[in-house]
Amino acid sequence: MARAEANKIGQPTMAEQADLHELYEEAVQNVEGEIEFLQDTFRELKGRDAVSFREDFCGTASASCEWVRSGAGRHAIGVDIDRKVLEWGRRNRIGRLPEADRPRVKLLNEDVMRVETGPVDIIAALNFSYWIFKTRDAMRDYFSRVRDSLHEGGVLFLDAYGGSEAFETQKEKTKCDGFTYVWHQAKYEPVTGRTVCHIDFRFPDGSKIKRAFSYDWRLWTLPELRELLEEAGFAKVRVYWEGEDEDGEGDGEFSEEATGEADPAWIAYVVGEK
């Protein structure tokens, strides 16, 4: 649970006044870039524009809102089991769309393993959210359900991270506008693949929010994910690898890659075609 450390004179700290969801999106999300990649890749693979989009583990549904914002004929479905975060998204994300566009985003407070939606062009599970499934059977079952929820020729988009640093316990600090984002890899179990990670936020006044978000995942590798998608019936599985800028950092540009590189830390998309 998130904990904001208060100052000693009774005045509200920056941590106490902060909105966790706004901090999260500022620190780790780029929905404009994500949706642009989904649209462009789908068009490249299928020769047409995608219209319908389902965002699994949608949280605040920011990607769903960006999908709708990107085209007048597009509609989105966001699925998440956390009612409170969905309500936040309804107020703070859908509520910021033009009134006429709001009905094009539908939020479902349901389990992705049980939800029933009509077929869509694209389903995405981003921010490594689907790593809550820790066994091959559970992950394969999820992929099978997703495949059944896609139109013929539909596409599933997943993101993944890895590299030697992903198997270490460590903290990585990133300066953001008005706060510092801390990614804390607290535990990794080599035998099970289980990893436990936290997000902390620190502020210029010395206050902080410890464990604002916590994750208990299995650290999946790309070969495992590709094999499970194929076992679930996806006709073609591709990996899109992030390029590097002149400093050797990720540049946010992704291209299809057959082998990848032995980078200590990498980000990729895994794309399954029905």
Image: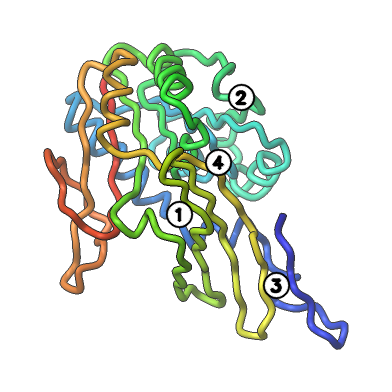
Task: Report helix, strand or loop for mark 4.
Answer: loop
Decide: few, some or many residues near mark 3? Use Cα within 10 Å; few <14, some 14-19, many ≥20: many
The mark that comes first in sequence, 1 or 4, is 1
Decide: few, some or many residues near mark 2? Use Cα within 10 Å; few <14, some 14-19, many ≥20: some
Q: Residue placed at 42% from the left, 49% from the top?
A: 31
Residue bearing mark 2: 111
Q: Is residue 84 above or below residue 76?
A: below
Q: In this view, does 164 lie above or below 105?
A: below
Decide: few, some or many residues near mark 4? Use Cα within 10 Å; few <14, some 14-19, many ≥20: many
The quarter of the image holding the C terminus is: top left
Instruction: Give residue 29's mark.
Output: 1
Residue bearing mark 4: 61
> Which mark is nearer the camera, 2 or 1?
2
The mark that comes first in sequence, 3 or 2, is 3
Instruction: Give residue 266's mark.
Output: none
The mark that comes first in sequence, 2 or 1, is 1
| Residue 36 point in image, percent of width and height | 31, 45
Amino acid tagged 3 = Ala
Separation of residues labelled 1 and 4 (CA atoms) = 12 Å
The mark that comes first in sequence, 3 or 1, is 3
